[in-house]
Amino acid sequence: MKIKWLGHSSFLIQGEKATVITDPYDEIGLEFPSVTADIVTVSHDHFDHCATSKVGGSPRIVNKTGAAEVSGVQITGFPTYHDTVKGSQRGQNTVFRIRLDGITLCHLGDLGHALSETQVSQIGSVDILFVPVGGVYTIDAKGAKGVVEALKPRIVIPMHYRVSGLSLGIAPVTDFTKIMGKFREESVLEVAAGTLPKETTVVVLKLAL
């Protein structure tokens, strides 16, 4: 499996069975790259997460809670909120668990609160976690650390943070990496089910634009 960061909360996850793109964006100061996919997941309907028309290849759009299987990929959506007041400020958010190539990935979308014990139990074991860290519209670095500690993934990939050119006023990834301590940078993350690290490892991906 190969994972590339397309910017913001959007990743290209290329597996043997299918290619998945998460939360394609528009109007955030970054130009969404020319990419194709079999599946696109959308955590919520805000412009910086639901620009499905930007993705080529006539992909299947998955934007609801519940279980689905698309092109041999198992996807389950869990209802959460975009804020700390049960969605009254920013609405609903869907967390997606994606099972591909024997690896379980979890994309938190614009999660705005700590996960409850019930939600942690429902999501279950996670190999790779995509977690927002920029605050303001989502959990911040401290909140992200708490979610990481709750889910105990093998690999953590931060997202939804400030980069050059981004028009949204959110915090940089360094707020998160300072709290977490050790991390490594990669242009492309290549992983297989048998090669995942034993301890939680933070990987900061470079923009693949």
Image (cartoon, helix red, strand yellow):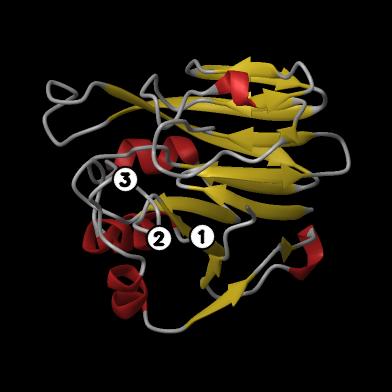
- What amino acid does circle 2 point to? Ser
- What amino acid does circle 3 point to? Ser
- Give the residue furthest to the bottom: 182
Tag 1, which secondary structure? strand
For label 2, the residue is 164
Quadrant of the rendered structure where residue 57 is? top right
Pointers 1 and 3 in contact (C-beta within 8 Å) = no
**Mark toward the start of the polypeptide (1 vs 2):** 1
Tag 2, which secondary structure? loop
Quadrant of the rendered structure where residue 32 is? top right
Distance between the alpha carbons at the discs numbered 1 and 3 = 21 Å
Dot 3, crowdedness within 10 Å: few (<14), some or many (≥20)?
few
For label 3, the residue is 167
- What amino acid does circle 1 point to? Ile
Quadrant of the rendered structure where residue 58 is? top right
For label 1, the residue is 157
Residue shown at 33%/73% (left/top)? 174
- The residue closer to the viewer here, 75 or 23, is 23
Nearest to the eye among marks 1 and 2: give it: 2
